[in-house]
Amino acid sequence: MTCTILSSGDEFRTLCRNESEKPFSTIKAKVWETVWGLYCRGYDSFYVNCDYGTPMWAAEFILNLKAGNEVKLHIMIPYEEQTTEWPEELRNRYFDIHAKADSVTLAHTQYDPFCYQDTNEKMINKSDLLLVFGSENGAPFAEEYAKKKGVPIEYQEIIKKPN
């Protein structure tokens, strides 16, 4: 079965920007636990846009999972210059993931206001499940599209919201 993994961006609604500190270490553990759980439920093919945050971390965990398991990682790039403004270390990780992925597809050569939406739709079209890291309505266009296509949606909250 195939799963598309997206993020609501909740992981960046924190003051911390150091990926090795809390809450990111806790978030990454939750991402790993979730990816492993999906694999244990029969999901063996994953689509991500490899955006920085949970999609990139999920891709890294999926690659680790590939080491001893039959798992496929598919990257769908929203636009060619997605990482232009990223620090070099993140760009290097991004391209390392691409080199190890089973497929890498470029959705658009240039940025346009709909390139992420179009990319998400293309991934959802190939999926049996949409997983959104974050809260419901965190990725509203993708969620609406998945519902329209009859693709089930699961949410994995990664930042506890204050009551």
Image (tube, helix red, strand yellow):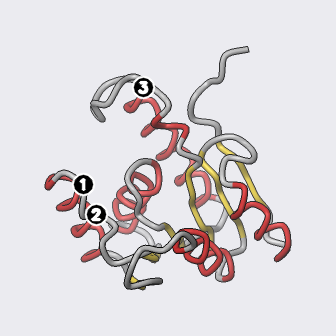
Can you tell which of label 2 and label 3 is closer to the viewer?
Answer: 2
Instruction: Say whether marks 2 and 3 touch (CB < 8 Å).
Output: no
Instruction: Say whether marks 3 and 1 touch (CB < 8 Å).
Output: no
User: Label 2 to label 3, Cα distance in Å?
Assistant: 24 Å
The image quarter containing residue 111 is bottom left
| Residue highlighted by disc 1 | 86
Amino acid residing under circle 1: Trp
The image quarter containing residue 16 is top left
Q: Residues within 10 Å of mark 2 (few under 14, many from 20)?
A: some
72 above or below 28? below
| Residue highlighted by disc 2 | 83
User: Label 3 to label 1, Cα distance in Å?
Assistant: 21 Å
Secondary element at tag 3: loop
Precedes in sequence: disc 3 or disc 1:
3
Quadrant that contains the N terminus: bottom right
Residue at point 17%, 61% (across, down): 92
Q: 138 or 113, which is in the foreground?
A: 113
Task: Residue lying at the far front in this picture: please name it.
Answer: 113
Amino acid residing under circle 2: Thr
| Residue highlighted by disc 3 | 23
Task: Residue lying at the far top in this picture: please name it.
Answer: 163
Secondary element at tag 2: loop
Q: In the figure, is residue 49 to the left or right of 104? A: right
Residue at point 49%, 67% (across, down): 48
